[in-house]
């Protein structure tokens, strides 16, 4: 029987167990002290990383857990998963709300609850494919940046003891709007660090997370459809379990304005085509390499007749915003590699110039209020704020490929 967890451990992360276990074990007392009996709010908690964060924090027995997500079906599955897991602690005060964190009803719930001790925000547009045109760019920036400020203003009324918002490795020297939005998000949350402690984490791709290319491989195999993947893009990977644990450690043990990242070596990067090939082998197929999406689609018809040759189209990346490799720390940042065994911590971040942040918000809001704003205008505004933002524009979106 195929085990996704075992496959990830053997072929993707190539670790038999979580790399963060030692740091969790050595800091159990501190984690217990800061979590046990506390109220916890997790926004975007039904997603891959948010749900993993919930599973990482529950063993430390918070008094209450409120989970907010716009995906009602995923919230239902989260509850079924937690309730069906042997030994999983679920507090008596456990509530899921299918709502938008930028909505008036969320504000009502938050104020009537009197705020929360621990707040984790995992609501984000996370895909490079989200920048296909001006409309998708506006939606992305509103969720990742503009609405994040609305949440921070609300939290300022009833400040939490700990606030965490997930970032991405793509925020280091960004080449796409998603990565740049997360780099700006870091400045936005840090600009509130004089009101309550804020922390974040840049980490690798989460193996087989919802909507990811590897998760798509599983769907394609189930439907006997061909696989397509870039052959030249290398990425760091963490397991779903590890993704929640790094967020837990950053949220609870991080100091104000810390950015956590996993200690991974360049040799640990993986390519998507190699993952696809290993996945097909585990499912009993031989790889049949094709020269185009169309050829692979045609060849896939043979699978329905029992063929053991699985068509794939592996090719060089040619879509906007794709970086050939990932990094966690820029040359201008200082990192502490000694505090934790499996984690590095970017330190020394100052409170950003709030006037620059406010100016950026005014310019973005003004741009989105116009009917004729272009993607290029928005990129120019972001480049003015982030001089090192080298946007890669090819004119081609991932939506044009399998």
Image: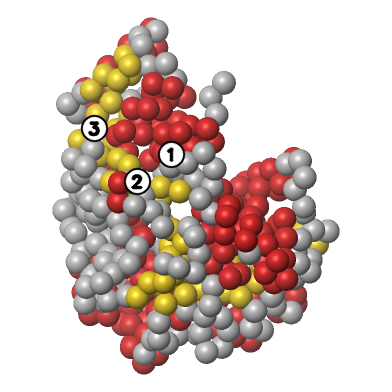
Residue 242 visible: yes
Residue 47 visible: no
Task: Provide the secondary structure element on which disc 3 rests.
Answer: strand
Task: Provide the secondary structure element on which disc 2 rests.
Answer: helix
Asked if the residues shown at circle 2 and circle 1 are in contact, with their CB atoms under 8 angstroms apart, the answer is: yes
**Tag 1 residue:** 14
- Compared to residue 217, the image places residue 396 above or below, namely below
How far is disc 2 from disc 3 in space, using C-alphas?
Answer: 21 Å
Q: Quadrant of residue 218?
A: top left
**Tag 3 residue:** 314
- Compared to residue 353, the image places residue 126 above or below, namely above
- Compared to residue 123, the image places residue 145 above or below, namely below
**Tag 2 residue:** 268
Residue at left offset 54%, top offset 36%: 5
* Near-viewer residue (218 or 22): 22
* Near-viewer residue (212 or 277): 277
Picture coordinates of residue 131, whole percent (x, y): 30, 58
Picture coordinates of residue 200, whole percent (x, y): 48, 69
Residue at left offset 41%, top offset 47%: 237
Residue at left offset 40%, top offset 86%: 350
Q: Which mark is residue 33?
A: none
- Compared to residue 123, the image places residue 397 above or below, namely above
Q: Say few, some or many: other residues with alpha carbon within 10 Å of mark 3 (under 14 / 14 to 19 / 20 or more).
A: many
How far is disc 3 from disc 1 in space, using C-alphas?
Answer: 22 Å
First in sequence: mark 3 or mark 1? 1
Residue at left offset 76%, top offset 41%: 86
């Amino acid at each position: 029987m195929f085990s996704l967890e075992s496959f990830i451990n053997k072929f993707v992360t190539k670790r038999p167990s979580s790399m963060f276990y030692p740091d969790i074990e050595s800091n159990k007392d501190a984690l217990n002290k800061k979590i046990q009996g506390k109220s916890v709010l997790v926004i975007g908690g039904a997603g891959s990383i948010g749900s993993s964060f919930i599973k990482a924090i529950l063993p430390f027995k918070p008094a209450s857990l409120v989970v907010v997500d716009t995906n009602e079906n995923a919230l239902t599955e989260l509850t079924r998963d937690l309730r069906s897991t042997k030994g999983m602690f679920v507090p008596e005060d456990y509530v899921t709300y299918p709502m938008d964190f930028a909505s008036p009803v969320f504000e009502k719930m938050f104020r009537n609850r009197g705020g929360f001790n621990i707040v984790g925000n995992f609501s984000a547009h996370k895909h490079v494919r989200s920048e296909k045109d001006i409309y998708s760019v506006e939606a992305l920036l509103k969720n990742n940046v503009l609405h994040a400020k609305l949440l921070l203003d609300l939290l300022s009324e009833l400040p939490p003891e700990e606030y965490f918002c997930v970032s991405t490795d793509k925020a280091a020297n960004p080449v796409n709007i998603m990565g740049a939005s997360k780099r700006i998000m870091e400045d936005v949350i840090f600009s509130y660090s004089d009101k309550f402690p804020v922390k974040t984490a840049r980490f690798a791709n989460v193996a087989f997370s919802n909507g990811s290319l590897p998760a798509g491989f599983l769907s394609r195999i189930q439907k006997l459809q061909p696989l397509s993947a870039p052959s030249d893009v290398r990425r760091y990977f963490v397991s779903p379990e590890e993704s929640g644990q790094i967020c837990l450690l950053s949220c609870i043990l991080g100091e104000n304005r810390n950015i956590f990242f996993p200690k991974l070596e360049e040799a640990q990067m993986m390519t998507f085509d190699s993952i696809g090939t290993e996945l097909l082998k585990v499912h009993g197929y031989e790889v049949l390499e094709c020269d185009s999406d169309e050829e692979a689609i045609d060849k896939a018809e043979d699978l329905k007749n029992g063929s053991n040759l699985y068509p794939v189209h592996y090719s060089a990346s040619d879509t906007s915003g794709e970086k050939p490799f990932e990094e966690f720390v820029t040359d201008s940042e200082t990192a502490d590699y000694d505090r934790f065994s499996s984690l590095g911590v970017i330190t020394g971040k100052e409170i950003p110039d709030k006037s620059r942040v406010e100016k950026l918000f005014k310019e973005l809001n003004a741009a989105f209020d116009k009917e004729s704003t272009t993607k290029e205008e928005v990129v120019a505004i972001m480049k003015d704020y982030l001089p090192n933002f080298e946007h890669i524009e090819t004119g081609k979106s991932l939506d044009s490929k399998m």
